[in-house]
């Protein structure tokens, strides 16, 4: 997704995160996301990762990426997800293996 003029520049976001005392990778790991999740949110809409970055910076996601949110603060693309990971979900069910023929 191309950055809109009203959105923060990705380098400004990364610098703000570093100035806050952490890194994009550390934010991702602390939230239980893949190491590159927060960095990926700089390029493509990812409401959960955007919320994590914004919370660290003490602003709302729509303040950083106004082009990605409507006037009510809801994401235009993607699905809204809370900042805190839902730890109550059960682990994925393992795949069954086919039994061997006798």
Image (cartoon, grey):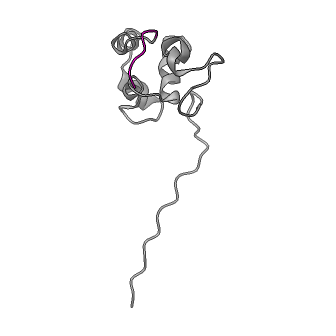
Q: Where is residue 62 in the image (x, y as percent from the top left)?
A: 55, 15
Q: Position of residue 72 (x, y in %)?
A: 66, 18
Magenta segment, prevailing SS (helix, strand or loop): loop
Q: Quadrant of residue 87?
A: top right
Q: Where is residue 69 in the image (x, y as percent from the top left)?
A: 56, 20
Front residue of 32 and 5? 5
User: Does the magenta run of residues contain 12?
Assistant: no
Outermost residue, right side: 72
Q: In this view, does 44 lie above or below 58?
A: below
Q: In which quarter of the image is residue 98?
A: bottom left
Q: Is residue 57 above or below residue 101?
A: above
User: Looking at the image, which residue is at 36% across and 13% down?
Assistant: 18
Q: Quadrant of the C terminus?
A: bottom left
User: Looking at the image, which residue is at 53% across and 52% down?
Assistant: 91
Q: Position of residue 30 (x, y in %)?
A: 45, 29
Where does the magenta region start and end? 1-6
User: Going by the image, does 3 lie left or right of 61?
Assistant: left
User: Going by the image, does 7 lie left or right of 11?
Assistant: right
Q: In which quarter of the image is residue 84?
A: top right
**Circle count:** 0
Q: In which quarter of the image is the N terminus?
A: top left
């Amino acid at each position: 997704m191309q950055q809109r003029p009203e959105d923060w520049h990705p380098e400004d976001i990364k610098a703000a995160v570093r100035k806050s005392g952490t890194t994009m990778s550390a934010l991702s790991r602390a939230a239980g996301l893949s190491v590159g999740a927060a960095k990926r949110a700089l390029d493509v809409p990812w409401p959960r990762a955007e919320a994590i970055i914004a919370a660290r910076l003490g602003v709302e996601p729509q303040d950083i990426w106004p082009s990605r949110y409507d006037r009510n603060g809801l994401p235009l693309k993607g699905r809204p997800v809370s900042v805190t990971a839902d730890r109550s979900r059960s682990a994925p069910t393992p795949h069954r293996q086919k039994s061997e023929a006798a």
